[in-house]
Structures are given as C-alpha cells and as structure tokens.
Image (cartoon, rainbow, N blue to C red):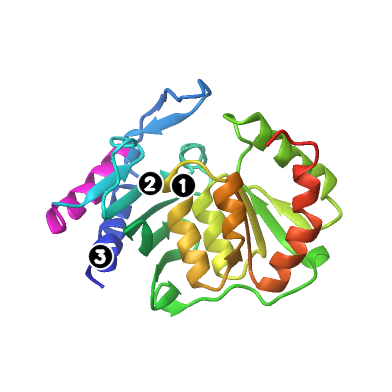
Amino acid sequence: MRELDVLRDAIVDARGLLGRGMSVRGKDTVAGVYDIVTDVDVKVEGLIVDRIRTAFPNDSIISEETAPDSERSDRTWAIDPIDGTVNMSRGMPMFGMQGVFMEGGVPKASVIALPELSGTYEASAEGAFLDGTRIRTADPRPLRECILSTGDFSRRSEDYRLMQARLMSDCRDTVARFKMFGAACVDFAYLASGRTDIHVRFVNKIWDFMPGMFLAEMAGAVYDRDLLAETGILIMCSSRPVLDDALSEILPRITSSCRR
C-alpha cells in the first residue's frame, strides 16, 4: 500500500531529527493549561508533511503543530509529530511519532514509531506489525489479572476528569495494575502487542487516538463503537471477553452520578 509506505518511510526518516539540540517553549492551549512544544516537534512535522504533500498533493493533512484545524476530505491524514513531548523533554523514553491515513473517514494505514522503546509499529488491512513481525493482543484473562492503561487527566472536561478519578479509585481492586504512560502512542502500541490488556481514554484530538486505535484494532483489540460515538469514552480491550467484563464492572462505576 503506497500510503503506508510513504508514511512509514517519512516517520522512520524523521527519527534522524531526534537527539539534536532541542529548545522548549510554552504552548497556548484552548483550555489555558500548561503544555509545551519543541523545535523537534516542528521539524519532525515538517518532514512528514512534506513527504505526504509530495506524494499526494491533493490530500488533506491535519497536523498538531501547524494545521490542527484543517478540514477533512475524502482522503485525510492526521499527524502527531511527537506524542509525549513532555516525556521527551524530560528525558523519559515514553514518547513517539505517529500518523494515520483515512479514506472516507475510515482509517486505512497507520504508523507509530517508539524510538527509545520498541521499534516501529504499522497497521493496514493486512494486520498489525512491529518491525515487520505480526503482533496480536493478549489472550483473555480475568479483570483482576489485567493491566489497564489510561491517559492523562482531562484538563478540558470536568466530567471526564471525574470519571478518570473514579476509574483509579473505585476500580482499584478490579484490575491488577494501572499504568499512566503519558503518551497515547505507548498506550495503544502496548495494548496491540499484548503488554497491557485494557486502555481507557476520553478521546479528543484525532491525531492523539486514531493512529493507535487503528493499530490496536488490527492487532485484535475491540471496543464499544456506540459508547465511543455517544460519549467519547473509549474502553478498548485485548479481546471480547475482557471488554464484556470491563463494560459490566468498570463502566458503571466511572459513569455513576455523572452529568453526561
């Protein structure tokens, strides 16, 4: 698939921009909360976008740093040049580069590179792969043996923030361990490759969740599409039995007394 080849080659080449002198500056956000952007984010995004523009000049591109509000078309790309920028800026290895190609709103190809962790993940109709080797989600296991990862606390939605607080308090004995990696690319890559069993996220920007969600789905992960569409709550699990248990035991606890 040409789109997958272009995206993979661009992201792999962009890894060469890491490790150079990095400047960090504050970044304005809609919610008025602290965030940062580095010169590496901008350079990586520029390289990837230029490659896509050269290969597919008529496609739409949504990119976090320079074109976050671009309109979608029948052929749309979403790019997150550095997911986990705060982690990267502090010398923590949980960060990556990711992108997805969508046709008619449906993801067709995605790539996630975790430069300091475990290589390059990619997904298409052919399946999900890590450095060319097919990956699958973990086999079903009881919730009490599951590792659950979740994103950072929402700064924009009080409802989401309260639900996440309930997740980590009211469900503390429901699963084996909670993990908060601080980067969606790691959350989804680890779910796709069987390192974790459940990922709970309150979705926001398409470049944050779509590359990894497609990767995990192509590796065998499942989620409740109606729940996501109606509430923005993504509970993605390694298998159908784990999802059924999560919807039965976790979802009611985190949504209790919620205004949503």
Query: Which residue corresponds to mark 2?
Result: 80
Query: Which residue corresponds to mark 3?
Result: 3
Q: Residue at x 13, y 54 (%)?
A: 54
Residue 68: x and y in percent read 34, 37
Pointer 1: residues within 10 angstroms few (<14), some, or many (20+)?
many
Residue 224: x and y in percent read 61, 60
Residue type, label 1: Asp
Q: Residue at x 41, y 69 (%)?
A: 123
Q: Are marks 2 and 1 in contact (CB under 8 Å)?
A: yes
- Judged from the image, the secondary structure of the residue bearing numbered disc 1 is helix
In the depicted structure, whether residue 13 falls above or below residue 240: above
Residue at the extreme top? 32
Residue 112: x and y in percent read 41, 59
Tell me which segment is drawn in magenta: 42-57
Distance between the alpha carbons at the discs numbered 1 and 3: 19 Å
Distance between the alpha carbons at the discs numbered 3 and 2: 16 Å
Task: Specify whether 170 is left or right of 260.
Answer: right
Q: Give yes or no for residue 109 being in the magenta stretch.
A: no
Query: Which residue corresponds to mark 1?
Result: 208
